[in-house]
Amino acid sequence: MPEQIQTHAGRVALVTGGGRGIGAAIAAMLAARGARVAVLDADAALAREAAAACGGLAERCDVTDRASVDSACAAVEAALGPVDILVNNAGISPKPGGRASPIWEMPAEEWDQVIAVNLTGCWNLARRLTPGMVARKRGWIVNMASVSGKAWTPLVGSHYSATKSALIGLTRHWAGELGPHGVLVNAICPGRIMTPMARLVAPAVNEAIIANTPLGRGGEPEEVARAACFLTGPDAGFVTGTTLDVAGGWMMT
Ligand SMILES: NC(=O)c1ccc[n+]([C@@H]2O[C@H](COP(=O)([O-])OP(=O)(O)OC[C@H]3O[C@@H](n4cnc5c(N)ncnc54)[C@H](O)[C@@H]3O)[C@@H](O)[C@H]2O)c1
């Protein structure tokens, strides 16, 4: 099994929103490939469960709270050593009543919260961890964007697509800044991946997405995890500043 090849031995990885869904699958696959893994999640119980499943370290961390980010990162460094791999995966996509709010109905608090988690949260982690990566001339960052950051879909709110577009831009910018210092930065754009987030909408909505997906199915979290392992492993040594769709061909641009 490819997971058993120790491509990530000697690397310390930190995954935000790692308590369930895509993040939990990434944490598990990085651990199976030899990384020492920290699972960070705003939900401490989810973090503990996912970390226990992969032999990783659990830390409660709300990515919007800089004090929480700083203390969780310090705890990870103390327990596992300097962080080599940052997977900025935590994200939310509010759908009150099962659908995304259009701009004329969206509460300002909802806008602020999505920007805080999906965008500023990634910046908070990178701000805390990149000084060490630059000093060591070694690091890998993966930002979890979305195909909805590249093309329009009514399935998500304007806050969500704005943050995912921003992550694609941030990825290119950080790749440019950090490349000369030996740090690689890439983004993943998942399509419909069958996680608790995907189940916030009615089953008919997911069926419609699948009908428009050339590969004819939703993706599994493990399929995104394989992309994250590629982008943080030895096979992607000359890959930086790119976005990799893991979407079965849905919303190709
Ligand atoms: N599932 C999809 O179809 C899909 C598609 C495109 C992109 N994505 C992106 O992939 C990432 C993971 O999505 P998922 O489907 O696994 O979602 P999910 O809702 O199943 O899991 C998200 C995890 O993030 C945690 N989290 C939420 N807010 C947090 C915060 N402030 N600080 C720390 N942790 C927090 C949650 O507790 C949860 O464990 C997100 O960035 C999402 O936008 C998902």
Image: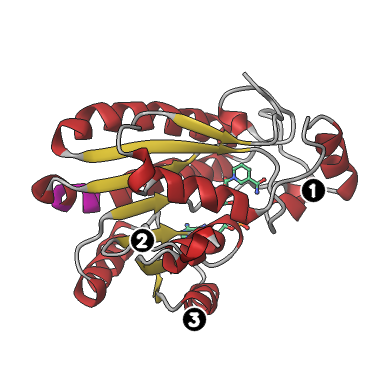
Does residue 112 lie above or below 30 as drawn? above
Q: Please, what secondary structure does the residue beneath circle 1 have?
A: loop
Task: Work out whether residue 102 or residue 202 is closer to the camera in this orientation and state it.
Answer: 202
The image shows residue 207 at horizontal and vertical percentages of 87, 42
On the image, the x and y values in percent for residue 41 come to 47, 66
Is there any visible trace of residue 21 in the rendered image?
yes
Q: Are marks 2 and 3 in contact (CB under 8 Å)?
A: no
- Quarter of the image where the C terminus is located: top right
> Sequence-wise, which precedes: disc 3 or disc 1?
3
Q: Label 3: which residue?
A: 52
**Is residue 70 left or right of 91 when viewed as pictured?**
left
Q: In the image, which residues are magenta?
A: 127-132
Which comes before the other along the chain, label 1 or label 2?
A: 2
Q: Is residue 95 above or below residue 76?
A: above
Amino acid type, residue under disc 1 in the picture = Val
The residue tagged 2 is: 14
For the residue carrying disc 3, how many other residues have a C-alpha within 10 Å: few (<14), some (14-19), or many (20+)?
some
Q: CA distance from mark 2 to mark 3?
A: 15 Å
Residue plotted at (21% across, 32% down): 179
Residue nearest the observer in this picture, 104 or 97: 97
* Residue wearing tag 1: 201
Is 250 situated above or below 112? above
Quadrant position of residue 120 = top left
Categorize mark 1 by other alpha carbons within 10 Å: few (<14), some (14-19), many (20+): some
- The mark lying in front, picked from 3 and 1, is 3
Q: CA distance from mark 1 to mark 2?
A: 29 Å
The residue lying at 28 percent from left, 61 percent from top is 11
